[in-house]
Amino acid sequence: MIAVVYSGTKTAIWKIAKDGKTIAECSMPGINPFFVDQKSLLQQLNKKTILINHAEQIKKIYVFAAGATCVERRNELAESMSLFFKFAKVTVHDDLHGAAIAACFNKSGIVGILGSGANCAYFNGQNPVPNNFGLGFILGDEGSANYLGKIILKHFLQEKLPAELLKKFGTKYDINRSEILERVYKKSLAQQFLSSFLDFYIENREHPYIQRLIDDAFQRYINTYLLPTLKEYPDKEIHFVGIVAGNFQDRLRLVAQKNNFEITTITKEPIYNLLNYYSN
């Protein structure tokens, strides 16, 4: 029995398989090792009946987590997981590695993440080539759910949204300036708070103003991540992974065409491809 875990900062998705067939699945808060310590992770794991019931039967766990970008962080997360799954060999990589496998399997290509966070790398068929893009939700993540959350909050607070969207936003979230600033600057897990506003974009995706915000965010992503990668690795297939890319495929492909490149595949939920990869 194996388990595959794909975790952004907001949510971790679990799939458990036996003999190539999925037998259980669940989700939990993200397990980014920059924000979740061992005690918190074990508390989260112990809340999941599915994981408790299968803990002793699982022999291999493949974890792909945002924030697991260095050996130290990966080892910390693997050690914490091993305290719960005592009979399992735990392998940890960052979410970019998981996205690359899900999109390319064993082939080379350029892989972009547009989920709760953002990243991009050339995948050589075995590993993503290291780069300097992964700066997190404060210094980076252009085009991601975190970034889109920041933009919609700024436009709401500055009353730049069209009247109908301003009213919808106020009704849906019933939140004021002081509450927003407290959640962003004082409370923990600000990145999860920011990414939660992706729902507003999805619900209002046909509104021209929302489309313009999305297109602008994708263009910023392309300028920051993709064009430098394409310059170094021209003529490689381009793949995207993540909930933002998956939900706004039409806008992403349109902005890509304006920048004179085509997207080969867009995978909204990489966990399914990862499970297939490690089950066979």
Image (cartoon, rainbow, N blue to C red):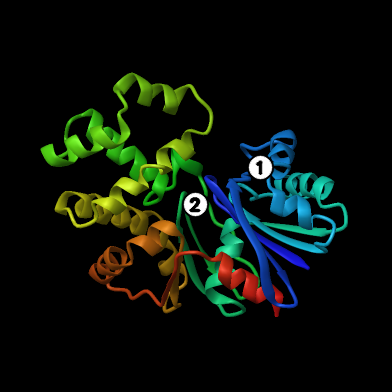
Residue named by callout 2? 133
| Residue 47 x/y as whole percent | 69, 42
Q: Nearer the viewer, residue 174 or 190?
A: 174
Q: Residue at x 71, y 45 (%)?
A: 45
Which of the 4 image quarters holds residue 92?
A: bottom right
The quadrant of the image that shows the C terminus is bottom right
Residue named by callout 1? 33
Residue 129 shows in the view: no
Q: Is residue 141 left or right of residue 75?
A: left
Q: Residue at x 50, y 43 (%)?
A: 136
Residue 66 shows in the view: yes
Q: Residue at x 24, y 28 (%)?
A: 157
Q: Nearer the viewer, residue 50 or 148?
A: 50
Rounded to the nearest angstrom, the CA distance separating label 1 from label 2 is: 18 Å
- Type of amino acid under label 2: Phe
Please report whichever mark, 1 or 2, sits nearer to the chain's N-terminal start.
1
Label 1, secondary structure: give it.
loop
